[in-house]
Image (cartoon, rainbow, N blue to C red):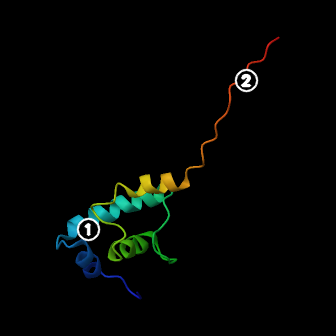
Amino acid sequence: MARITVEDCLETVGDDNRFSLIHLAVERIKQHRKGEPFLVAGKNKEIVMTLREIAAGKVTFDNIFDLPKQRKAEKAPPVAVVEEITIEE
């Protein structure tokens, strides 16, 4: 995808309301700024990468708030069970 357009994103989102698209993009950019990785490959500015995520269908209104939770679950280290030890003096 050489260029990303608003029309590409609106087709994927299924809504002709550009303001809804802006709200979706802003929420995703906030997630990126908190450390969430991009879901598409590329080295563009964050707004372009976010619009590419939306156009690819990887970020939608249905999953926008679930994306950080999914990433945290994937990155969570395994839980180790530690036995309690008491030291007697």
Circle 1 SS class:
helix
Q: Is residue 43 left or right of residue 4?
A: right
**Residue 28 image-quadrant placement:** bottom left
Q: Residue at x 48, y 57 (%)?
A: 71
Which image quadrant for residue 81? top right
Q: Position of residue 36 (x, y in %)?
A: 48, 59
Q: Nearer the viewer, mark 2 or mark 1?
A: 2
Which residue lies at the image location 46% right of the left edge and 74% below the top edge? 40
- Residue at the farthest top position: 89
**CA–CA distance between discs 2 and 1?**
55 Å
**Which residue of the protein is positioned furthest toward the left in this rendering?**
16
Total number of numbered labels? Answer: 2
* Closest to the observer, 80 or 59: 80
Numbered circle sitting on residue 54: none
**Label 2: element kind:** loop
The amino acid type, in three-letter code, at marker 2 is Ile
On the rendered image, what quadrant is the C terminus found in? top right
Q: From the top left corner, tell me how far across and down residue 5 is, in percent.
A: 31, 82
Query: Farthest residue in the bottom direction?
Result: 2
Which class describes the residues within 10 Å of circle 2: few (<14), some (14-19), or many (20+)? few
Tell me residue 30's x, y (percent).
40, 57
Residue at position x 79%, y 13% in the image? 88
Q: Which residue is mark 2?
A: 85
Position above or below: 31 against 56: above
Q: Kindly identify the residue that appears in the image at 43 percent across and 73 percent down.
A: 49
* Residue identified by numbered label 1: 21
Q: Residues within 10 Å of mark 1 (few under 14, many from 20)?
A: many
Of callouts 2 and 1, the N-terminal one: 1
In the image, 30 versus 63, the foreground residue is 63
Q: Quadrant of the N terminus?
A: bottom left
Horizontal arrangement in the rendering, residue 58 relative to residue 14 (left or right): right
